[in-house]
Amino acid sequence: MTIAARWLLPDGIEEILPPQAARIEALRRALLDEYQVWGFDLLQPPTAEYLESLLTGVGHDLDLLTFKITDQLNGRMMGVSADRTQQVARMDAHSIPKEGVARYCYCSQVLHTKATHLLSSRNPLQIGAELYGTSGNQSDLEIISLMLRSLEIAGLKDVTVDLGHVGIYQALIAEMSLTADQQAELYTLLRHRALPELAQWLSSSELTDKQQRILAKLPEMAGSVTSISDWKAALAGAPDEVFNALANLQAIAEATIQRFPNVNVHLDLAELRDYNYHTGMVFSAFVPGFGQPVARGGRYDHTGEVFGRSRPATGFSSDLKVLTCLTSLDWSASSGILAPDSDSVALQQKIQQLRSQGERVIQLFTGQTHIEELGCDRMLVMEDDQWQIQPLVNNGRN
């Protein structure tokens, strides 16, 4: 390996350089401050945990994304966290003595074995919020509202939120006598919208004509909230749980439209992302020019059951690096003030005063060059026996 090759990063692993790091940090602070005023407590899950804790009960996709390592202390298998949700469930079940409604938020890097799509990083900076202890529509609405508020703060425009409810699909297949392999195959066909293959699979199945008809139409049930009445008619004869889930979906969609009139709300009854992991509402946010969700979440009741404490829960997460790249706002760090090379007590007092006010002050060293790289637009100058701020001529170029 050549010397140059030693410094190459693995494919999909990103480093964050100035000034992008400062922009990301500014947005991180703004979002976590917003979560705090909503009542969400900040926590920091560990980087790695034992596999039986990290992956129990989660979807197959997350298992494939998780790096497995061996604990050199005892030989047990560990996993590097690929998603914080399961960890928060464990912490709520065992580490946090709250019996009522609990709100948590977090922001830290996770690691993926492979990129989840062409636009994604393998080390996303995941920021998110989780709400535990209540299963009503109000909690789903709060999480969706906080997700959309996050995108507002980040400066994203023309947002579309896609709402679904995996309870509809779960209720439909619950009355069908399908083997585990058949359920997996049907789920894959619906999730990938493979309509010709789905039609062929249904025609060769032993499902009733009514069941085949409903499953064939399910991928077509996508659109605005005004289409729900038509979907109810198409779902005639389905179990009552289907219509209960549809009523929940309609209520949350209408409330979201009322709270965020500038957001386009789209419904999709065949949104089956990790249906064996999620138990109710699922939602994703999109913006023009980016082909993947910029934020996503859903309800995952009973996730904590494997830790001995089953609690209803809902939450969302996003990649902070993606939000910063897509924002229309300037999250750049403030420009700086250049201070001359001097041991003057008055100068040091002035520098300290400015820094206490949040100003970025950089003092030069003796003989320092390449001043333009410091990013300063002002300078301290002695005038009338006082250190005063003046514009930096030619941006400090020498």
Image (spheres, rainbow, N blue to C red):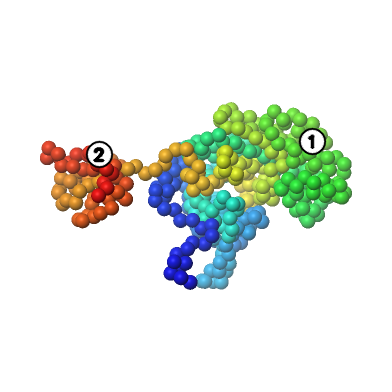
Q: What residue sits 27% from the left and 50% below the top?
A: 371
Q: What residue sits 75% from the left and 38% below the top?
A: 220
Residue at the spot of label 2: 391
- Relative to 380, does residue 115 appear above or below in the rendering? below
Residue 247 horizontal side relative to residue 215, left or right? left
* Front position in the image: 263 or 375: 375
Residue 92 horizontal side relative to residue 348, left or right? right
* Front position in the image: 54 or 366: 366
Give the foreground label among 1 and 2.
Answer: 2
Residue 235, which numbered label? Answer: 1
Q: Which sits earlier in the primary sequence, circle 1 or circle 2?
A: 1
Mark 1 touches mark 2? (CB < 8 Å):
no
> Badge 2 local density, few (<14 within 10 Å), some, or many (20+)?
some
Give x and y (percent) for residue 157: 52, 35
Quarter of the image holding residue 329? top left
- Relative to 398, does residue 113 appear above or below in the rendering? below
Give x and y (percent) for residue 398: 25, 49
Question: Under tag 1, what secondary structure?
Answer: loop
Is residue 139 among what the camera can see? no
Q: Looking at numbered disc 1 in the image, what kind of residue is underneath it? A: Leu
Give x and y (percent) for residue 109: 49, 54
